[in-house]
Amino acid sequence: MPQYDYDLIVIGSGPGGQRAAIQAAKLGKRVAIAEKKTVLGGVCINTGTIPSKTLREAVMHLSGYRERSFYGSSYSVKQHITMQDLLFRTNQVIKHEQDVTRHQVMRNNIDLLEGWGSFAGPNKVRVESTDNHGLQELSAEKIIIAVGTTATKSDKIPFDSETIFTSDEILDLAKLPKTLAVVGAGVIGVEYTTIFAALGVRITLIDKRPILLDFVDDEIADSLAYQMRENRVTMRLGEEVSTIETLQDEHGKRVKINLQSGKQLIAEKVLYSIGRTGNTYRLGLENAGITPDDRGRIKVNTHFQTEVPNVYAVGDVIGFPSLASTSMDQGRLAACHAFGIEANSVPALLPYGIYTIPEISMVGRSEEELTQSNIPYEVGKARYREIARGQIIGDNTGLLKLIFHQETKELLGVHIIGEGASELVHIGQAVLSYNGKIEYFVNTVFNYPTLAECYKIAALDGLNRLGV
């Protein structure tokens, strides 16, 4: 008889948990997933990545944003856009992704344990049904934690899910506000700022950091800031919120935001987006001998093992970079290591996709990093307005920037802002993966007209700067 009920139990069914479970199942292991919700997919499918990106596409289409350079700033597909219009598309995609995820799990013969998963010991998982009518305790040789995160809240903020809410609750909005204050200029806050601004909502973005998206290439971040201001976004950077309170007057229910500098802002609604907290409060980590940090995140080693060797953690619950793409790879790597299978990844070539309007994507190193490391480099740039495809799609502001070694001409980084950036970046990622040089793009023939031509134009620009 087996010593354990399962070879692996995964707690959480988001991208990391799903990929870990499937990888283990393909290795012939007995696998189960404990999921507290009746639907699979975690935050990624149900409240985070998929909803926000689908909402963005609905906004881009219905607002006519992509066509305004041709038909004028007043152009839109639908004059009065409602939340119901936006959610129709979003809900369709969510349901489809939920079904795909369930099908993948079922065809790999992975058992689904519906309920709250928590530790009863280093090798024991207690699963309590969400209706509190059932409790089972199961053992596993290996356990992977993939519970994701929840939006961070402050006890000082009077959240009501109607006028003051987090990104986890944004899909519950009954109607679009005329004015919106966004507290927190991280990736989520900036994405929603640009999405709602494209709909004509007057946005005020507040963050105590003085720079917008400080991990993004300075030139790209400056371009985004400029285009946000063009969409009437007011940015209060270097400002900190002291209190938020609700008002009820002849204008209806509104919100007043008091800043520590003494300024006061009035908005119809507030999106509070100061970060994410690991969803570990009901995991019973103490029963396994694991201690999370003050944000509920779990510390892991390079193999994603926690301080207890048979317990792993992957995805947003371990912190940076908190991307669905990296979570999937972490799940695969953790499952392989747990069962002694060699697997590799290249974290230095991790691509980032930020789904603002316009979108941003990057891979490799930035100018700032290279300058700090005293590495001589040069840049080559191509602007979408120089490319026929850029004119066809109406994106006159897009930019692709290549960074390469000044002496060896080896490609070091790719940074893009504009339509299709998150797709376009993978061409550069492939060249980076084999230490390719800038000449690759000069000698390669790209389809015409495509945005991929930007690589050739940028490479030629870079070589011209060297006098070649």
Image (cartoon, grey):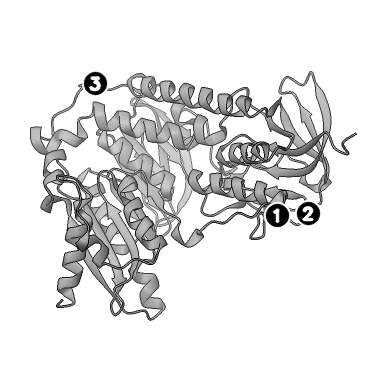
Q: Earlier in the sequence, mark 3 or mark 2?
A: 3
Q: CA distance from mark 1 to mark 3?
A: 51 Å
Q: Residue at x 30, y 49 (%)?
A: 424
Q: Position of residue 279 (x, y in %)?
A: 64, 41
Residue tagged 2: 308
- The residue lying toward the viewer, choosing from 266 and 135, is 135
Is residue 370 shown to the viewer in this render? yes
Q: Residue furthest right?
A: 1
Q: Residue at x 75, y 49 (%)?
A: 311
Q: CA distance from mark 3 to mark 2?
A: 55 Å
Q: Is label 3 in a helix, a strand or a loop?
A: loop
Q: Is label 1 in a helix, a strand or a loop?
A: loop
Mark 1 in CB contact with mark 3 (< 8 angstroms): no
Is residue 183 shown to the viewer in this render? no
Q: Residue at x 47, y 44 (%)?
A: 273
Pointer 1 local density, CA inside 10 Å: few below 14, some 14–19, many at least 20: many
Q: Position of residue 445 (x, y in %)?
A: 19, 54
Q: As drawn, is 283 to the left or to the right of 296? A: right
Mark 2 in CB contact with mark 1 (< 8 angstroms): yes
Residue tagged 1: 305
Q: Position of residue 361 (x, y in %)?
A: 34, 52
Residue tagged 3: 80
Q: Residue furthest left?
A: 71
